[in-house]
Image (cartoon, helix red, strand yellow):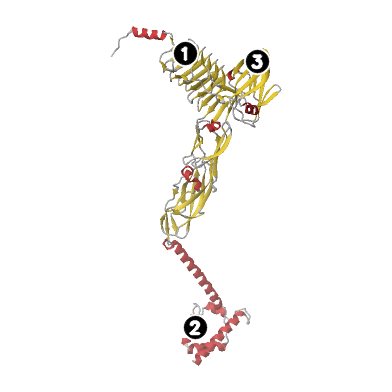
Amino acid sequence: MRTTFRPTAIILVLLLLAMPLTAAAPPTSGENLTISTNENWGEDAAMNGHVTVANGSTLTVSANITMGMDSSITVEEGGNLIVTNGALLSNGLNSGIRVNDFLATVSLNFGDIGQEGIVQLKFDHSIPIDTLFNITLGDTTVNASTSMQASGTTIIEFDANFSGENLVISFDSYYFTPTYLLWAKAIYGGGTIITQIAPEITNTSNAPLYWFQSGYDIIAHGSLSVISSQINGANITCEGLCNIEGSMLSGSAPISAATTATVTVSDATITGSRSDEDIILHDEASITYTNSQGTGGSTDGWIRLLSERVLQTNIPNGSLDITDLGYGKSDWNALTDSTGRVTLVSNDPTTEHKRIVEWMNGDGTVQQERGTITLSIGSSSSWGSYSTTVDAPTTAFGTIDLPLPYVEVSSIQPEDITATVNRSIGAMVTVSNTGDVDTTANFRCYVDGNDADTQPSTLTATVAAGESKDIPIVWYMYKEGMQSLNCKAFLPVTFSEIGDMVADLNGTTSDEVNWVYAEEIEETPYIIYIVAVLAFMGIALVAQRGVNKTYDEVPELPDDDEEEDEDEASEESPELEEKEEPEETEEPSEESPELEEKEDPEETDEPSDSIYDLVDESETEESEEEESEEDTD
């Protein structure tokens, strides 16, 4: 549907944009006021109440506004508070100059009165008895502890000459409770009094001005700009943009900047803080600080204060060594919990010095924490220990990851698919390290979830990151069947909670090997054994035949009478001849012509007394004995 163009609407918008800021005044009776349009406070006035600048609205203060105690101005997100050429002032605030810092001095000048009189110094509390707290003016030194105990007051007096010269008062104390000078009075001429309160005493050294409380609040969820103006006694909180330019802030520190804030300070003076810093940046708040002067002395221009210091690591129950942490350079040890998490510093007032990670001191020098944290886990086994040292995280939540190895068994290769029960088989185990650091790792092998009988029983290998190594082993089995070998990393107890981070806990399983008893192995080896035994027996038989043949070849040289007797005996006793046949060799009983030729006594060259003759004679004697036995029968 098309809409009708209405020129009057545009005219109204232009008129609204061209309208000047509405002139208004702050509340005066403690009421609440919400500013939902652009508004300007251009006349000096007093404010008592609570003002809220709504989203999309701007409150401009260009006059001197005296703020009542506990009043407040709150700027919503999207709203703006601009103080330009004006002031937000608070009266009646208590403040003091801290005078128990080292070498603290305060210079007073009441003008050229031309008379002598008394100077009184008012302190915030009484100095305990027997405390070293000396105060010196000129040639006179007073022990504040003794004087206060004697007078029952917190006032110290000196005689003085008010001639327009500075009255330099020095403090020498060994007392650590903060002590503040609240005011100084010159009393002369029969009762005339000139009083200078702490904020008016500006000529000091190592004696910063502190405000004990603020008079009113400025809470900027949106934008706050202070340009060429003065803010006195405010408690300022910034969550959005806070810009302080060419202005004076007195008694309005510390400015608290939330983690979402962006703070800009340029050509400004900040003096009189209620703490040890002018600006507190929480967590990740940002700051730009140029050409400006803070309270100085022991008061830092700004600090970065973490809400807490929590660390998440990858090591459950890991060990932490903390060094030089925070503003105070603290050292201590800690342990991570079962999830690897640890709260190093909690949000507690007593831990502030451990939570300050960055600061600009009173001289304008920016410094940073130099803390380190060492995370480690280890064992007494060959696996050893692993550790890493890093700069301490400067955020409320930080992480540290310890580089670790990651070992696994890549493969297991048995040398055969068949093996003999009660005997061994060789295998090659390949291990790898795909982690970030080198390691020396242990491995073990298992069969059906039980320890396998391997040599070595525990495999140890030093494996660099990205490296693989082969480990030869010997595997024994004592029962038959198809079996496979599973090998995996063997971790120490201290690594139990990070086991899956340093090793493949499932391991790798080999191909199955058929384990059988010896007689079930293929027959070829037994045939070889049988052939070898038969060959040995054959060699032995041949050797024996060779010995017998040697004796058979010895020529016999019997006498003629003996031959005849032998013939007769053989004819008379054929049975005896048959019995003697087994003792004879396999040579035929009738000698061949060749043998006869050998045995021909006429053809032999051997002498008649040779060893062979002795053998023949013994045989002959044996034969005669046998014949006589037969005759006897």
Foreground tag (2 vs 1):
1
Mark drawn on residue 447: none
Query: Sequence order check: which comes first, mark 2 or mark 1?
Result: 1
Q: Judge whether 153 appears above or below 633 on screen.
A: above
Outermost residue, right direction? 139
Mark drawn on residue 60: 1
SS at badge 3 = strand
Q: Residue at 42% across / 8% down in the picture?
A: 18
In space, the residues marked 3 and 1 are separated at their CA atoms by 46 Å
Q: Judge whether 571 appears above or below 221 on screen.
A: below
SS at badge 1 = strand
Query: Sequence order check: which comes first, mark 2 or mark 3?
Result: 3
Mark 2: which amino acid? Glu
Residue 492 location, x and y as percent?
Answer: 50, 48
Q: Relative to the observer, which residue lies in front, 196 or 305?
A: 196
Q: Is residue 467 left or right of residue 448?
A: right
Q: Quadrant of residue 57?
A: top left
Task: Name the residue that disc number 3 marks.
Answer: 188
Task: Name the residue that disc number 2 marks.
Answer: 580
Q: Residues within 10 Å of mark 3 (few under 14, many from 20)?
A: some
Q: Judge whether 479 appears above or below 216 on screen.
A: below
Label 3 close to label 1 by CB (< 8 Å): no
Q: Is residue 407 left or right of residue 159?
A: left
Foreground tag (3 vs 1):
3
Residue 161 location, x and y as percent?
Answer: 69, 16
Q: Residues within 10 Å of mark 2 (few under 14, many from 20)?
A: few
Q: Residue at 47% across / 65% down in the picture?
A: 529
Residue 628 location, x and y as percent?
Answer: 53, 90
Label 2 close to label 3 by CB (< 8 Å): no
Q: Judge whether 138 appears above or below 450 on screen.
A: above
Mark 1: which amino acid? Thr
